[in-house]
């Protein structure tokens, strides 16, 4: 059963990691997928993903676009509408971390994280709600983090940006529920991606896993399946919520 047949999704930051997994799972369930990447170094990988999704018999297109730039997001959504005709689902997944103790953190490090992690969610949501309101339907999924719920030493900027996403999600859900537009957040814990590759081996990895009741890091597909639920009609009565996909880390 394909849960997203006939739907069009935008996924930001999808050349690798969680975003790539979400784009792949969405396409597997019948969605046409537009996705973004930001750096030239990701262009080849994005092209391979585009070809992989198209091989499923669906429409797919990679766009080089910076979700932290408002004008770039406006151009992106207009381009997607011109090619795909509509936007049913938006997954705000683009994100970075520049971890440092507050005592040593620079204003530039703080601003960079806020720009990409939090302002990007405003930028993209501001653009996609226009066609969604016209269609009187839509699902917006914002990628937060368990760190936004718990906090963590050395990650004040990351935690603040991800906590901000949760508050933003609740507010947008209240504003747009009457238009049949749902807005939810996912708060992953440790996920096996490039960002956490340094934790995969050695005593450090075992220490982190020991604090997770399920005893393992998540795969990208674990998080993508939560996004699939929220994007599909199976999640049609869910809005304004944050689903913690963290293996029980925040218990």
Image: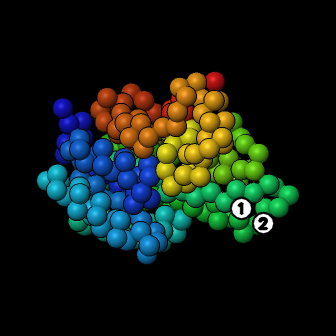
Extreme-right residue of the structure: 103
Q: Position of residue 87 (x, y in %)?
A: 31, 53
Label 2 secondary element:
loop
Residue at left offset 23%, top offset 55%: 53
Callout 1–callout 2 Cβ contact below 8 Å? yes
For mark 1, does the 10 Å Cα neighbourhood hold few (<14), some (14 to 19), or many (20 or more) residues?
many
From the image, tell me which residue sits under label 1. Answer: 110
Residue that sits furthest to the bottom in the current view: 40
Q: Residue at x 38, y 40 (%)?
A: 221
Percent coordinates x, y for residue 240 in the rendering = 51, 35
User: Where is residue 59, by image quadrant?
Assistant: bottom left
Image location of residue 218, percent across then percent down: 48, 37
Residue 21 circle label: none
Secondary structure at badge 1 equals: helix
Residue 194 image point, x, y percent:
51, 55
Q: Quadrant of the N terminus?
A: top left
Disc assigned to residue 106: 2
Q: Is residue 41 visible?
A: yes
In the image, what residue occupies the spot 71% across and 65% down?
Answer: 109
Residue 188 visible at all: no
Q: Name above or below for residue 83 compared with residue 202.
A: below
**Quadrant of the image occupied by residue 50:** bottom left
Q: Tell me if mark 2 has few (under 14), some (14-19) or many (20+) residues whose alpha carbon lies within 10 angstroms of its own.
A: few
Seen from the viewer's position, the closer of residues 10 and 97 is 97
Residue 250 is left or right of residue 242, and the answer is right
- Direction left: furthest residue: 57
Compare residues 216 and 24 and report the one nearer the observer: 216
């Amino acid at each position: 059963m394909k849960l997203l047949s006939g739907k069009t999704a935008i996924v930001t930051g999808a050349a690798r990691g969680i975003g790539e997994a979400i784009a792949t799972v969405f396409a597997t369930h019948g969605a046409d997928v537009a996705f973004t990447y930001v750096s030239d170094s990701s262009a080849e990988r994005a092209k391979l993903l585009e070809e992989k999704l198209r091989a499923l018999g669906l429409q797919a297109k990679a766009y080089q676009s910076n979700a932290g730039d408002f004008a770039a997001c406006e151009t992106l959504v207009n381009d997607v509408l011109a090619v795909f005709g509509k936007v049913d689902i938006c997954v705000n997944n683009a994100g970075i971390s520049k971890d440092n103790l507050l005592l040593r953190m620079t204003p530039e490090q703080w601003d960079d994280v806020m720009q990409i992690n939090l302002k990007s969610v405003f930028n993209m949501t501001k653009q996609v709600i226009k066609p969604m309101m016209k269609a009187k339907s839509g699902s917006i999924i914002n990628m937060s983090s368990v760190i936004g719920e718990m906090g963590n030493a050395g990650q004040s900027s990351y935690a603040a940006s991800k906590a901000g996403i949760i508050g933003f999600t609740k507010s947008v859900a209240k504003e747009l529920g009457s238009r049949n537009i749902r807005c939810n957040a996912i708060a992953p814990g440790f996920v096996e991606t490039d960002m956490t590759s340094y934790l995969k081996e050695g005593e450090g990895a075992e220490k982190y896993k020991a604090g997770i009741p399920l005893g393992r890091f998540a795969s990208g597909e674990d998080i993508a399946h939560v996004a699939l639920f929220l994007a599909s009609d199976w999640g049609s009565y869910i809005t304004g919520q944050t689903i913690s996909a963290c293996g029980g880390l925040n218990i």
